[in-house]
Amino acid sequence: MRGLSIRGLTRTFPGQGSAGPTLALQPTDLDVTPGEFVSILGPSGCGKSTLLRIVAGLDRPTAGSVTLNGRQVTRPGPDRGMVFQSYTLFPWLTVEQNILFGLRERQVPQAQAREIAAAYIARTGLRGFEHHWPRQLSGGMQQRTALARALANSPEILLLDEPFGALDHQTRELMQELLLEVWGADTPAARKTVLFVTHDIDEAVFLASRVLVMSARPGRVKAEVPVPLPYPRDWKVKTAPEFGALKARLMAEIREEVRKAALA
Amino acid sequence: MEPLKPVTATARLLLGTGFFVLFVGLWALATEGGYVQPLFLASPARALAAGWSLLTEYGFLHDIGMTVWRVLGGFLLAAAIAVPLGLMMGAYKGVEAFFEPFISFARYLPASAFIPLLILWAGVGEAQKLAVIFLGSVFQIVIMVTVIAGATRMDLVEAAYTLGAGRGGILRRVIIPAAAPQVMEALRLVLGWAWTYVIVAELIGAQSGIGHMIMDSQRLLDTGQMIFGIVVIGLIGLVTDLLFRQLNRRLFRWAVL
């Protein structure tokens, strides 16, 4: 069984104090084939990050299972690379050392590790910043490094949890293009599987080959919208009529959920 | 003056030295002007002269050396035990649950109250002096390091897990380096406190040291020497603090200290 397979995944958070338990994620099924780029779109608090964290192994489901390439996920591992919304570079390591972190942990020989790091530094446009500390970098550069750090481990799937959520609009658009460029640099057969969580409709459509819309809490996948725009895509695709039509459809789906979430 | 508005570096320097000048000026006025008897308070000039004779005639440098040695010895011993223990307690909640209640209790035991007991156990030699500093510092360091290590950013820990780090890797490659600058800052703070314990330790049953000298001067009613001794402690404290700060800046250039 290749790819990611999610069956009956449920997550309930225990209640605190007098409040009862919260159902964050309703039983969810999902299949992602290797090389697919899937966006998970939903209002805040809908459980999309919970879903991603369970796939990463950082959170445990109340029921159900996650299987990646035939192996059940029980704990975090380097086969599932992740980029977080918050800046999670290790502040005491330089850009290059951050990228080497996972390679060192897996005891990749040093010469080979440095070669891999150099390749991803080049691919993510970080040349000249190898020896900078995270605090010397802009938010965009930090997230480039985080992306390179995740990719350097050659994970089977890339989990992106609103990685550009804290960036300003222009930087964000640049980063989306960079991500597509890095992802698309491999041949279609060798491309990484990507799960991309976002609440930004433009971002979801621009990046993904399939968009899943999640309902307001308790979260479930309420709609699935394929994005038939061919890769490679560049920013101009955002002005194409097909893009507009997809956006309109997703907007209608999501508005209803945002309203429900706001009233809840 | 405007609330929270910064002042220039020159103004800061002038104001800072200004108060020193004012302080010494008032001191000089009170003593030289005859408002306070020399028996109770020596004048600044008398204190300086007393200090000069202490250094040149009475081997005060040896006393200073002894005191510095005791502070550093006791403090380093305490740090060598307390820092690893604190890191373990911060990282592993089970270890914390085991030690924390006792250490929270022990850190309120005043080190100076142990002096009679320590004299009984260890005599009046160096071991007893080191033990006072050690007892005064060790629990404080443990508690501070525990809090620092326990507050390691969870998102960094999670990032390390997704990069393939195991449990040992989290401790070695995330918790320890993340805590290091703050641990050093905590040590700097506790070293300052260790200076107050050493003097107390030297007031009782010591044959050398700054505290011993101050005690001797009391018998001779030499307030000049006493004040000089106190000022020397203040100066050494200030210098070690500055050195420590410099060291931390150099070691942790990645952090903004």
Image (cartoon, coloured by chain):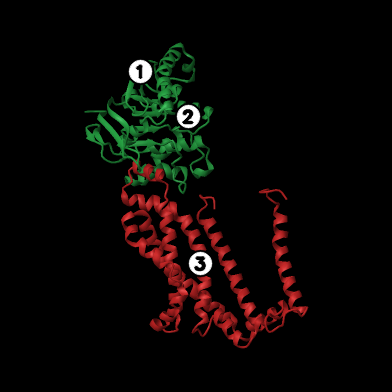
Chain colours: A green, B red
Kindly identify the amino acid type of the residue bearing the numbered disc 3: Leu
Could you say which is closer to the camera, residue B119 or residue B174?
B119
Q: Which mark is residue B191?
A: 3
Residue in the image at 28% along x and 41% along y = A75
Residue found at the far bottom of this picture: B220
Tell me residue B88's x, y (percent). 35, 58
Q: Are marks 2 and 1 in contact (CB under 8 Å)?
A: no
Mark 3 neighbour density, 10 Å: few (under 14) some (14–19) many (20 or more): many
Where does label 1 land, which residue?
A225
Q: Residues within 10 Å of mark 1 (few under 14, many from 20)?
A: some
Instruction: Examine the rendered structure and indicate whether residue A161 appears above or below residue B192.
Output: above
Q: Can you see residue B130?
A: no
Residue A231 lies left or right of residue B59; in this view the side is left
Separation of disc 3 and disc 1 at Cα?
63 Å
Q: Are marks 3 and 1 in contact (CB under 8 Å)?
A: no
Q: CA distance from mark 3 to mark 2?
A: 48 Å
Give coordinates of residue A96: x percent, y percent. 44, 43
Above or below, comparing residue B142 to residue B112 in the picture: above
Question: Amino acid under label 2?
Answer: Met
For disc 1, the chain is A
Pick the residue in front: A25 or A195: A25
- Residue A86 is situated, as x and y percent measured from the top left of the image, at 45, 38
Vertical side of B207 occupied by B10: above or below: above
**Quadrant, the N terminus of chain A:** top left
| Disc number for residue A175 | 2
Task: Please tell me whether mark 3 or mark 2 is closer to you in this view.
Answer: 3
